[in-house]
Image (spheres, rainbow, N blue to C red):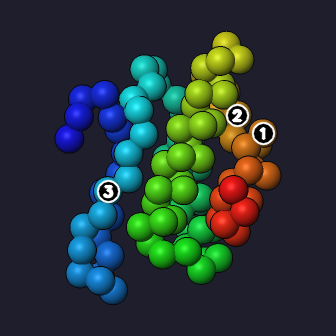
Amino acid sequence: FEPTELGAAVYDRAVDAVCYAFSPTIAGIYHGTGDIFASAVLAAFLSGRTLQDSVQLAVDFTCASIRRTRQAGTDVRFGVNFEAGIYDFIKAVRGED
């Protein structure tokens, strides 16, 4: 693994494999990102995506939310701006991206 990347590992029992999803590391501490990640994984998985795809979509969505918040310079104590990315996330889950 690279120190410039952060992500998630998941064991998919259906295929008996460990899968990884990465994104470039973003410096800082961002409250609520675990909840955003978990919600995105579940939403994608319940929409019919594979577990591996669901985890990658969730990593991408969570990191995009962090980047959006960092670029806006808003106070990170109030969480990240995930709302602005929901439409794009839904499109990605549906395979419309």
Which part of the image, by quadrant, shows the C terminus? bottom right
Q: Secondary structure at mark 3?
A: strand
Kind of residue at badge 3: Tyr
Front residue of 60/34: it is 60
Front residue of 58/37: it is 58
> Which residue bears the numbered disc 2?
81
**How far apart in space, not on screen, are marks 2 and 3 (Cα)?**
25 Å
Outermost residue toward the front?
97
Kind of residue at badge 1: Ala
Q: Residues within 10 Å of mark 3 (few under 14, many from 20)?
A: some
Q: Residues within 10 Å of mark 2 (few under 14, many from 20)?
A: some
- Asked whether, in this view, residue 4 is left or right of residue 44, the answer is left
The image quadrant that residue 32 belongs to is top right
Q: Secondary structure at mark 2?
A: loop
Q: Is residue 81 above or below residue 54?
A: above
Outermost residue toward the bottom?
14
Q: Are discs 1 and 3 less than 8 Å apart at CB?
A: no
Q: Answer with mark 2 or mark 3, whichever residue precedes in sequence.
A: 3
- What is the x, y in percent for residue 25? 39, 29
Which part of the image, by quadrant, shows the N terminus? top left
Q: Are discs 2 and 3 less than 8 Å apart at CB?
A: no
The image quadrant that residue 81 belongs to is top right
Q: Answer with mark 1 or mark 3, whichever residue precedes in sequence.
A: 3
Kind of residue at badge 2: Asn
Q: Is residue 54 above or below residue 84?
A: below
User: From this viewpoint, is residue 79 visible?
Assistant: no
> Which residue bears the numbered disc 3?
20
**How far apart in space, not on screen, are marks 2 and 1 (Cα)?**
6 Å
> Which residue bears the numbered disc 1?
84
